[in-house]
Amino acid sequence: MPLLEVDNLTVEFPTRRGILKALDRVSFTIDKGEILGVVGESGAGKSLTGAAIVGLLERPGRIASGQIRLDGSRIDNLAPEPLRRIRGRRIGTIFQDPLTTLNPLYTIGRQLVETMQTHARLSDSEARRKAIGWLERVGIPAAAQRIDAYPHEFSGGQRQRVVIALALCAEPALVIADEPTTALDVSIQAQIITLLKDLTRDHGTSVMLVTHDMGVIAETADRVAVMYAGRIAEIGPVADVVRRPAHPYTDGLMASIPSLEHRVDRLRQIDGAMPRLDAMPDGCRFHPRCPRAFARCTEQQPELMAAGATQAACWLHAVS
Amino acid sequence: MTQHHRHTLEAVAVSHRFDVSRPWLQRIFNRESKRFLRAVDNVSFEIPTGTTFALVGESGCGKSTIARLAVGLYEPSDGDILFEDQPLSSARAQPALRRRMNMIFQDPYASLNPRWRVSDIVAEPIRAFRLATRPNEVQARVGSLLAQVGLTMRDGEKYPHEFSGGQRQRISIARALASEPDFLVCDEPTSALDVSVQAQILNLMRDLQQRLGLTYLFISHNLAVVRHMADRLGVMYLGRIVEQGPAETIFRTPLHPYTRLLLDAIPDLEQVGRSRTPVGGEIPSPIAPPPGCAFHPRCPLANDRCRTEKPAHTTTGDVQVACHAVQEGRDA
């Protein structure tokens, strides 16, 4: 049984001008110990998916239908208190900006100790010892002294290391990392990605890695879900999605990324922009920008279907 | 009347310091001296006309300070910036030369006035430099500028908030081109954009360069983007250019250990599932840079000389590099 099952998840935002569907029947699973990358451009719904799973949807957003199951039991319909216990204990979170996760008024040691004691019975000295252990594991030098420092006394890269320690210290089964390295410089990004990969492998933690950076996903994830306009366009093993994309959007996305290996005269571009939530086209949401669209694409919305080694929501792969 | 200049822009031993001292009274009480941040330290480069010179580096390396120096928004503390062989300070005094340089910024949300219609935004430089005076003449110019960046005259009637990020960057480019410049400084022009839109803007910038013979100073932290755009490349670390030369050469055979680290650190699509040992350490504060070579605390090749003596630039082939290890052949 997969650790996390997201089943036809639909998220709506009621507005004065009607209900906007920000996520439309999104389904995927994450196995134990697996890293699932979720990639897409701004507004595709990737962060929203993460927020819905940890129950942190911002009002007036709401889960309109569908289910989210962790280890087989539903977590999408929980009351705030049991949900809060799951968040932290069973699901850890890492966000883009470490300063919004860390409380500036408390030492990082106090934040680690508090997090661990909320979720497990630990004496103060035991918790402190464990906290120092975690700081060492995430690569904070002189952890025994630095544990009493405040967040502002750390550099951006080190703060993100502390956030990773915070997310993992309760030994959750699943970590949701939303753009964990976007605010960091490339040399620091490489350190953080390696750290995240090593630690989650050692603890058998599953990871949902949300990012716009396909390079980070290619290097880190086992499988990847490509999102477009609130839906999953394609999902499958990373190597297949990167090398043999089945959905024209994935294909265009890959080709528009400038390469370090060779220089081309022109980058392939996807003309136009992603549709707005209040002006979704009929049929496949990508068809107005799709170079391979045909009549059926304008009328009927495709669901995920087998396409080589991956699954793609594209009529090109329909067996008729 | 235009003379032929080999280089549009030339920086000769340029340094720029920021005063980061504490207030005067506090300094007196604590007996502190003034403190300076050397954002740019003895930097020289030249940009041949019609080509793109790119600067890459991580935060705090001084690349945006150079962008501002290159259009005269800052004055160098030492050294000279020459625009077509004239010192920039005197070039900027002449409106005829000032209109020939312009800048495109990173954030298309912050760099356009939200209260102005797009056509007024694009028309402003035309009016300011009196390139056209009669309203229908101005309108015609605005129309052709919008067409050049892939927008329509109808878009001119709208306000910036009605556009997506990529379209806003097109508006910024149209405005930058309105004064008919020869030289554009582009500071992270696609960093705020999604990749599919980034491809549109990069293609547009290369088309415009070919069509109009523009010279670019292109600033970015993204090496893949730089590789796509640059003819020549400078790699910056803590205020200095540690390696510069033809972009292709540097990408093929990077010499400086920092350039190699940067190239190695970038996650690349073609390397699915690679595992690696990233270089440790953080970027030091530019207020108190390490002595000797500023990169030595993170450098795998550092020795005692690197810790004490600042490396000078040496030229190997077409490439200039500032590294003791490369000079001594310790870099194998």
Image (tube, rainbow, N blue to C red):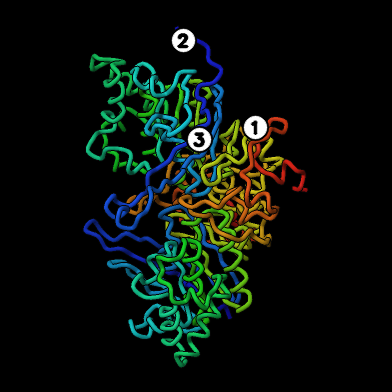
Query: Image quadrant of residue B128?
Result: top left
Mark 2 belongs to chain: B
In the image: residue A90, left or right of residue B297: left
Q: Earlier in the sequence, mark 3 or mark 2?
A: 2
Amino acid type shown at disc 3: Phe
Residue placed most toward the observer, A247 or B167? B167
Residue A298 placement (x, y as % from top left): 45, 48
Residue placed most toward the observer, B245 or B213? B245
Amino acid type shown at disc 2: Thr
Question: Pointer 3: what residue?
Answer: B218
In the image: residue A106, left or right of residue A317: left
| Residue depicted at 42% across the width and 73% down the height | A66
Residue B145 placement (x, y as % from top left): 37, 24
- Dot 3 falls on a residue whose secondary structure is strand
Question: Pointer 2: what residue?
Answer: B2
User: In this orientation, does residue A294 appear?
Assistant: no
How much space separates mark 1 and mark 3, taking CA atoms?
Answer: 14 Å
Q: Earlier in the sequence, mark 1 or mark 2?
A: 2
Q: Residue furthest top?
A: B1
> Looking at the picture, does residue A55 appear above or below residue B206?
below
> Looking at the picture, does residue A235 appear above or below residue B326?
below
User: In this orientation, does residue B183 appear?
Assistant: yes
Number of callouts: 3
Question: Pointer 1: what residue?
Answer: B246
Residue B201 placement (x, y as % from top left): 47, 37
How much space separates mark 3 and mark 2, taking CA atoms?
Answer: 24 Å
- Dot 1 falls on a residue whose secondary structure is strand
Residue placed most toward the observer, A187 or B153? A187
Which quadrant of the figure contains the C terminus of chain A? bottom right
- Badges 1 and 2: C-beta atoms under 8 Å apart? no
> Looking at the picture, does residue A137 appear above or below residue B60?
below
